[in-house]
Image: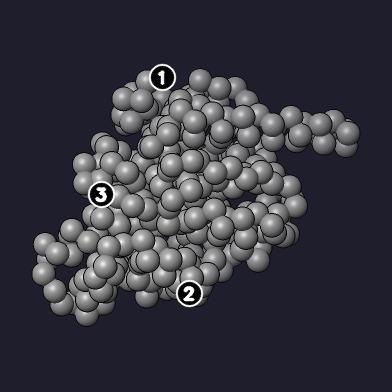
């Protein structure tokens, strides 16, 4: 499958809305499936918070081997966008993943999370590990205090002189020139998020179109578009301590010049009992868009390796 095709919205073999009930209120969560019923399915948790499945559509190529299930988290993408700030927290999103897994009838499956989706994947797997065959954590930010107190300061140091102050003044203090802020923001995005800025590929355009500001504002911080400032309810969340209790295979991966740098991922990797670690050279946070073929090949090989291991365990235990 060529890069252009990988970036297109998939032709879903099945899509619809899951009626999600939380605290006696009903919401609709969108999902879409591609692929064939062969091998075990892959469920994808997108980033954000407040994003959508759009930037992860290159993974549709894995549909030649298995079902690939995209879904938009509540408040995101094609799912309902209720005006209720109390919904936007990690505990409620963990409950949502559990609901989606049950409603889709997933018995044995792989779980992949990108960025915030990696944090959500670990939090979910620690509470509901049954039937998960593997975890793929792509550019995960699992320890927000580590990011806030260290990583983001290093990222600021990569910016031209004065750009960090321009971003802070605009995002935190509501001061400054909008054009100067946009210039500083785009410089940061091109350095650390995706090399294609200021002309992002179609998946990122769709991602921006489908994003929900309220979710991002509540969890990251109002107007904190650069994410070099984190003042929302994720500021003190650290799920990296949960990794040591997870025995299923974990794939850690990141770009070498991104906002979730190798040294952070290495820290997470050291906690794991059964893990692999990959670095995409010359890549930023959107590795699936910068090197889609390599990204897909890495995930593909890891899923098959995990399945072989899981089947061998089941055979030894006479399952």
Q: Residue furthest bottom?
A: 173
In three-dimensional space, the C-alpha distance between marks 1 and 3, rounded to whole angstroms, equals 25 Å
Look at the picture and state if 140 lies above or below 159: above
Q: Position of residue 68 (x, y in %)?
A: 49, 32
**Front residue (pair 226, 60):** 226
Q: Residue at x 75, y 52 (%)?
A: 273
To which residue does mark 2 refer? 149
Q: Secondary structure at mark 1?
A: loop
Depth-wise, is mark 2 or mark 3 nearer the camera? 2
Query: What is the number of the mark on residue 163?
Result: none
* 70 lies left or right of 270: left
* 306 lies left or right of 1: right
Task: Give the mark nearer the N terminus: 2 vs 1.
Answer: 1
**Front residue (pair 155, 247):** 155
Q: Residue at x 51, y 20 (%)?
A: 64
To which residue does mark 1 refer? 1
To which residue does mark 3 refer? 208
Within 10 angstroms of label 2, few (less than 14), some, or many (20 or more) residues? few
Depth-wise, is mark 2 or mark 1 nearer the camera? 2
* 51 lies left or right of 268: left
Task: Give the mark nearer the N terminus: 1 vs 3.
Answer: 1
């Amino acid at each position: 499958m060529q890069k252009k095709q990988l970036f297109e919205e998939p032709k879903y073999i099945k899509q619809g809305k899951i009626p999600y009930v939380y605290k006696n209120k009903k919401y609709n969560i969108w999902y879409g499936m591609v692929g064939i019923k062969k091998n075990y399915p892959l469920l994808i948790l997108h980033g954000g918070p407040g994003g959508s499945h759009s930037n992860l559509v290159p993974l549709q190529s894995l549909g030649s081997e298995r079902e690939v299930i995209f879904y938009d988290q509540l408040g995101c993408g094609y799912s309902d966008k209720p005006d209720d700030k109390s919904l936007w927290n990690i505990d409620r999103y963990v409950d949502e993943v559990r609901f989606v897994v049950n409603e889709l009838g997933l018995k044995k499956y792989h779980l992949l999370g990108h960025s915030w989706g990696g944090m959500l994947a670990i939090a979910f797997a620690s509470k509901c590990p049954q039937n998960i065959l593997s975890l793929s954590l792509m550019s995960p930010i699992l320890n927000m205090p580590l990011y806030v107190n260290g990583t983001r300061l290093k990222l600021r140091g990569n910016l031209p002189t004065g750009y960090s102050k321009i971003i802070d003044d605009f995002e935190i203090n509501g001061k400054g020139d909008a054009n100067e802020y946009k210039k500083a923001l785009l410089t940061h995005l091109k350095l650390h998020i995706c090399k294609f800025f200021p002309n992002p590929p179609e998946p990122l355009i769709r991602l921006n179109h489908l994003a929900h500001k309220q979710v991002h504002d509540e969890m990251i911080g109002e107007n904190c578009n650069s994410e070099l400032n984190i003042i929302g309810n994720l500021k003190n969340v650290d799920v990296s301590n949960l990794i040591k209790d997870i025995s299923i295979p974990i794939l850690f991966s990141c770009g070498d010049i991104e906002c979730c740098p190798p040294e952070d991922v290495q820290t997470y990797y050291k906690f794991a009992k059964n893990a692999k670690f990959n670095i995409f050279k010359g890549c930023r946070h959107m590795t699936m868009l910068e090197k889609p073929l390599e990204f897909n090949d890495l995930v593909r090989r890891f899923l098959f390796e995990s399945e072989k291991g899981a089947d061998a365990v089941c055979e030894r235990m006479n399952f």
